[in-house]
Image (tube, rainbow, N blue to C red):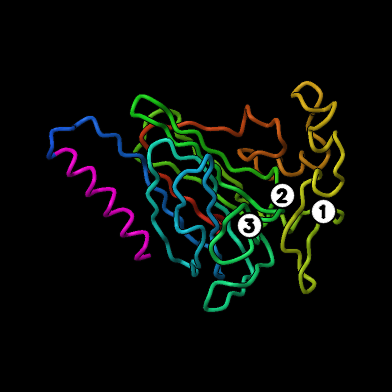
Amino acid sequence: MLMASLQNSSVSLVVAVLMMLGITNVWAAGSFTLHNACTYTVWPGTLSGNGGALLGEGGFALPPGESVQLQAPAGWSGRFWARTGCNFDASGNGKCVTGDCGGLKCAGGGAPPVSLAEFTIAKGSADKDFYDVSLVDGYNVDLGIQPSGGSGDCKYAGCVSDLNANCPQVLQVTDSGSVVACKSACAQFNTPEYCCSGDHNTPETCSPNEYSKIFKTACPSAYSYAYDDATSTFTCAGSDYMITFCPSS
């Protein structure tokens, strides 16, 4: 939490100094608040795209009921996800049952299946942010994105259903006898029709399948497969974002 507070303070200080110098057309991108509504600790992972700023040093522990705020620079893009069942030593070495990225501080993405919160933040005040919750890489915990203070459509995006409880047996990932994640059909079968690859790499040739339809029925505003853009990508301008793990709790 101290790290997040320092990040926010640093951004605010830069903006204040620029304004003192008479530079008033400063675009301050929105902040992310990661909140754990689960009844257990999760270890959020963060990944930045295009060599952008690494938020939250790549990953950290988030106990039940607690929140961490992270500030993104303008033009930032990346993703957040929850890791579960993690065990790390004092040096941050260890692994997680779901969403593992090789250590406490992620240098890459989380291992599927994992629920993702994805963002592309606007470069300026005249532009829009793009965001979505994606189950294209499968599902491990329910996840929601709530924008606040912005303008435009700014709709809630997410998956508030426990897909682990309704995951088809062929897609189940278990640990100690319990279902802890639900694979995507692509991860399980690795065929063009399920992965939207090869001769199925266009919206016209890759349609929803029997498994993605289960995901979509449970979570109508989340991506269920690669070409699920129309009902799963959202926009907002000048917003802050609350990312909640286990929002149904």
Camera-side mark, 3 or 2:
2
Q: Which residue is mark 1?
A: 171
Horizontal side, residue 207 vs residue 246: left or right: right
* Residue 152 numbered tag: none
Please, what secondary structure does the residue beneath circle 2 have?
A: loop
Q: Residue at x 37, y 62 (%)?
A: 3
Q: Amino acid at mark 1?
A: Leu
Q: Which residues are magenta?
A: 1-19
Residue 145 located within the stretch drawn in magenta: no
Quarter of image, res 192:
top right
Where disc 1 sits, the SS reads: helix
Q: Could you tell me if the residues under marks 1 and 2 are in contact, i.e. CB atoms within 8 Å?
A: yes
Residue position marked by numbered label 2 in the rendering: 138
Q: Quadrant of residue 104?
A: bottom right
Q: Is residue 80 above or below residue 227?
A: below
User: In front: 37, or 55?
Assistant: 55
